[in-house]
Image (cartoon, rainbow, N blue to C red):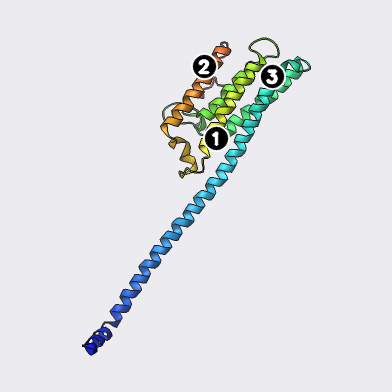
């Protein structure tokens, strides 16, 4: 019996080697596939960290600027003269306008295929709430005067509300638990969160309209929207 099994094994030795080689080849292919997926994940996470780093730099600049704007509003009557006030105001407006445009690199308009087909690509669709906050802050700053009108403290509180919305949206956008690609992350936010953010942005807009009824405010990116 033993001799028979040995003869059978010797007769099928080539087949056994082939089967063993096939098993090792399959195991190697699986290991290679797993390593490829791991490397791809590392590449995606590396890209995400790079984009998140740039986004956070932009967000930090926006947060700092809104803080300076709030302090400027509180101390506007302490400005040396009207010329000094206007110079500082224009400088802040220029910085804010630049931040709005730079922010489009990280927060593209939503639903670009639904509106604004006649505009440049970056201005089609609806602005996300994080940029709405900066645009509305720009309108408030533009309308603010050294004397008269709503008090400086109220303008400061308005800027701080805008800043809080920026912080909240920035935190949601860079949440490390998210696994979507960076360019798709904002569009895939939970519906409840997006609706809440849109509601808060609308609330800020309504307050601005009540405070500055003479200002024409465009909700989306139009030719008249000079703040953006």
The image shows residue 24 at horizontal and vertical percentages of 37, 71
Q: Mark 2: few, some, or many residues within 10 Å (few <14, many ≥20)? A: some
The image shows residue 109 at horizontal and vertical percentages of 49, 31
Vertical placement of 56 versus 45: above or below?
above
Number of the label disc, if any, that sits on residue 206: 2
Quadrant in the picture for residue 167: top right
Q: Is residue 65 left or right of residue 199?
A: right
Secondary element at image label 1 = helix
Vertical placement of 83 versus 109: above or below?
above
Name the image quarter holding the N terminus.
Answer: bottom left
Q: Mark 3: few, some, or many residues within 10 Å (few <14, many ≥20)? A: some
Q: CA distance from mark 2 to mark 3?
A: 22 Å
Give yes or no for contact between labels 2 and 3 (Cβ–Cβ under 8 Å).
no
Residue 218 visible to the viewer? no
Image point (38%, 67%), residue name: 27
Q: Which residue is mark 3?
A: 74
Q: CA distance from mark 1 to mark 2?
A: 22 Å
Which of 107/191 is in front?
191
Image point (51%, 32%), residue name: 122
The image shows residue 183 at horizontal and vertical percentages of 49, 40
Secondary element at image label 3 = helix
Name the image quarter holding the C terminus.
Answer: top right
Q: Which residue is mark 1?
A: 170
Disc 1 or 3, which lies upstream in sequence? 3
Quadrant in the picture for residue 7: bottom left
Image point (67%, 16%), residue name: 152
């Amino acid at each position: 019996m033993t001799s028979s099994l040995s003869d059978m094994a010797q007769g099928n030795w080539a087949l056994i080697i082939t089967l063993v080689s096939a098993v090792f080849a399959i195991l190697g292919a699986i290991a290679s596939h797993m390593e490829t997926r791991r490397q791809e994940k590392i590449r995606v996470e590396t890209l995400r960290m790079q984009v998140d780093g740039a986004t956070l730099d932009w967000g930090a600049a926006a947060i700092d600027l809104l803080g300076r704007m709030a302090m400027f509003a509180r101390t506007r009557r302490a400005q040396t003269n009207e010329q000094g006030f206007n110079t500082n105001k224009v400088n802040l407006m220029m910085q804010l306008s630049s931040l709005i445009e730079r922010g489009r690199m990280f927060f593209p308009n939503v639903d670009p295929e639904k509106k604004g087909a006649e505009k440049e690509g970056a201005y089609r669709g609806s602005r996300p709430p994080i940029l709405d906050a900066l645009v509305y802050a720009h309108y408030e700053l533009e309308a603010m005067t050294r004397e008269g009108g709503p008090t400086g403290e109220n303008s400061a509180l308005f800027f701080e509300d805008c800043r809080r919305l920026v912080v909240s949206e920035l935190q949601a956008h860079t949440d490390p638990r998210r696994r979507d690609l960076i360019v798709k992350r904002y569009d895939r936010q939970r519906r409840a969160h997006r609706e809440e953010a849109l509601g808060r942005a609308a609330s800020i807009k309504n307050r601005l309209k009540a405070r500055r009824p003479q200002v024409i405010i465009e909700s989306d990116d139009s030719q008249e929207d000079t703040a953006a």
